[in-house]
Amino acid sequence: MKRLASLMFTALVSFSVNAQTSSDALSAEQLKALVSGKTWALTFGGDLKDPSRTAYWDFKPDGSVCGRLHGDKQGSKCADTGNWKLQGDVLCWNFEWIGVNYGYKSTCKRVRRADGKFYELIDPEGKMQAVPFYPLETSRR
């Protein structure tokens, strides 16, 4: 009985989290302002307070993206490049190889505001956990 109650609670929590993702998503206009010409500090499965687990990506106004690996410094040489675009209120990108082993080489994500300056990338299909990030100064590269 405890196991059944635990499973029901887990399902309810999962449903609540997934239901929250779409209603808290940024609008297309908000997303464009957050992405175009910006550099993001983000982490896939790490802590943004840990420089060794933080990556910096430049989303250039021309639709190109420069991706750096976790631990690389902001402004350093791109580890990989690709393209980004907005499809309404969804951000899509396609890299040459970054993320190929983890399912985010070519993907589309919604964005929601978290706490303070922080945001989260949300997988509309729920296949990937939320990815925390925050925007930095305007990209100059």
Image (cartoon, rainbow, N blue to C red):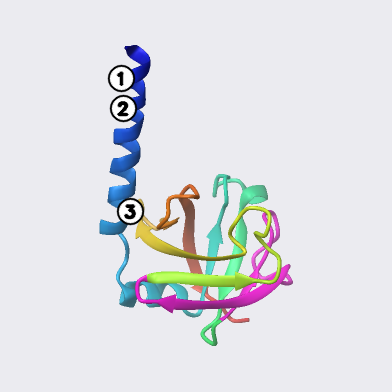
At x 70%, y 71%, the residue is: 96
Which one is in front, 129 or 39? 129
Task: From the image, state whether disc 3 or disc 1 is nearer to you.
Answer: 1
- Is the residue under label 1 in contact with that under label 2 (CB below 8 Å)? yes
Q: Earlier in the sequence, mark 3 or mark 2?
A: 2
Question: Residue 129, how many percent across, how many down?
Answer: 48, 47
122 w.r.t. 84: above or below: above
Looking at the picture, which amino acid does disc 3 mark?
A: Thr
Query: Is any atom of residue 83 visible in this view?
Result: yes
- Alpha-carbon distance for marks 3 and 2? 19 Å
Query: Is any atom of residue 24 visible in this view?
Result: no
Q: Which residue is mark 2?
A: 9
Query: Along the horizontal axis of the image, is 125 left or right of 96?
Result: left
- Alpha-carbon distance for marks 2 and 1? 6 Å
| Label drawn at residue 21 | 3
Question: Residue 47, how many percent across, how many down?
Answer: 55, 45
Which one is in front, 31 or 134? 31
At x 55%, y 71%, the residue is: 93
Residue farthest along the top direction in this orientation: 1
> In this picture, which residue range is highlighted in magenta?
64-89
Residue farthest along the left direction in this orientation: 23
Looking at the picture, which amino acid does disc 1 mark?
A: Ala
